[in-house]
Amino acid sequence: MLQVTFCGAARTVTGSMYYLEYIASDGGKFNFCLDAGMFQVGQKVNLFKVNSHLLFDPKKLDCIVLTHAHLDHCGRIPYLLKMGFGGKIYSSKATKQIAEVVMRDCARINTDEQTHRDYYFKEKGMGKDQFDEFDVEVDKLIAAKPEPEKENLGLYTEAEVDQVMPRFKTYGYHQKFHIHPELQVEFYDAGHILGSCCVVITEIKTGRKIVFSGDLGNKNKPIVEDPEVIEGLTKTTHIFIETTYGNKSHGEQKPKELLRKVTFETLSNKGKLIIPAFSVERAQEIIYFLVELMRENKIPQVSIYLDSPMASKVLEICLEHPQLYDQAMKDSISHGKNPLIYSRLKILESSQQSKSINSLDKPCIIIAGSGMLNGGRILKHLKFNLDKPQHTLLMVGYQAEGTLGKQILDGQKSVEIEGKLYEVKNRIELINQFSAHADQPILRQWVANQILSIHQEIKPTVFLMHGEKEASEGFGVELNNTFPDRLTTHWPFFGETVKLWS
Ligand SMILES: [Zn+2]
């Protein structure tokens, strides 16, 4: 018997966590989680309350299988440990390394409610109004059970992250392993961020399988491969797929060309290009394109300052895993031109080094956190540079309501930074074509490859996860139209339990 309870990313895009209960042939119980991510936004809900409210007893949890290192997939692992979880965590090696950076960063955040919420807005950029329906469901569930005691320390500390790390056991793509004598797991490349996995779980005695997409990547992203084709799994009974962009097509995207244009114009005008960047994946992607553009002589040769300790650590981890790169990256390296290593790329470690570049009076590129300008070293650079018209502030991701990034993007002539008003005279630009998530055509193809190889007598259920209403429902309609009578779709709600195998 196998059943799943949807503990997150159900009718919303954060908090990915599935709780699975398996009863083996000898009647023994085995419980495991697929991901243990954090809820990251919510206007009315208390995020501490939502994240600390668990739908199962962590003491009875035997292991966690982790798809990738984004906070909304790994962020609650130390909390589960704190509440009694004592098992192993299975992931790829890169996921383990990046997850450590992400969980430590989270532990350091002051988790008083408002700071907590602001932090998630700045890092994830979700709209404040997207969660009303979800909030009601959470409130209902919380009302039905006693509320956990609130602590001011936040969900966990770095000491708890220390205790989590030795519990990781890592495997590469296609390396089969067992989480239980009767359950085998295999990772496939999800092409989303470095080390990201789709997970296939097989019951050995019957050959039945369930497939989890994790977050699926966009095509032609730099550094990582495209999402891997999974086929030949004839006995798949259930597919869990993310649907962040389930109702959208990205269309033709040319982020590198857009970046070239803004960079060339700014540097030619003797200005500085200031890029607020998200630390995991986006910052490395921007560096990749900038270094390529310089090597191709399409933009002036200037210093690129990476002023984000978290992004620098993730960059280091990227350099440790050449086997995970896509062909374009491998080709560049074989020609002695690794796009993440460049003489003009300078990593700023200390805040002293960070300050020192303000006195430089020449064109350069500054990449600093956070991506939505609600904290981090980017604020220091803004204070110094925002009133100078020759500079450009280039946003490279969605700016959520209520963030400084959004205020500037909306054309405010002056903004408040750390209690003081600053005039906005920079050229303001936005490139929103750096999506890390698959669009509808990629998602549909990913499902199609599997459906075509599943035995005709099996009609798999596809769970539409990790999406807002229109995205998930839109993708459900698309799947039902494309594969009439070959599958059923289900859009689960938070807290719902579904029996997968009897
Ligand atoms: Zn992700």
Image (cartoon, helix red, strand yellow):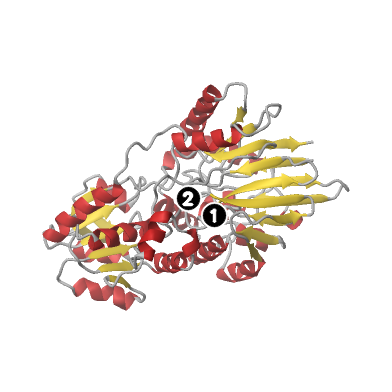
Callout 2: CB less than 8 Å from ligand 1: yes
Residue under label 1, please give it.
Answer: 68
Q: Mark 2 is on which residue type? A: His
Residue 172 location, x and y as percent? 59, 59
Q: Residues within 10 Å of mark 2 (few under 14, many from 20)?
A: many
The residue shown at (34%, 63%) is 339
Give me the residue at 48% from left, 47% from top.
41
> Where is residue 153 shown, x and y percent of the image?
56, 64
In this rendering, does residue 428 appear at all?
Answer: yes
**The residue positioned farthest toward the left in the image shown:** 269
Classed neighbour count for the residue bearing mark 1: other residues with Cα under 10 Å, few (<14), some (14–19), many (≥20):
many
Of the numbered discs 1 and 2, the one sitting upstream in the chain is: 1
- Give the SS element for disc 1: loop
Residue named by callout 2: 192
Question: Does the CB distance between marks 1 and 2 fall below 8 Å?
Answer: yes
Disc count in the image? Answer: 2
Whether residue 105 is situated above or below residue 182 in the rendered picture: below
151 with respect to 322 (left or right): right
Name the one closer to the observer, 326 or 47.
Answer: 326
The residue at 81%/49% (across/down) is 29
The C terminus sits in image quarter: top right
Residue 453: image x %, image y %? 62, 34
- The residue type indicated by label 1 comes to His
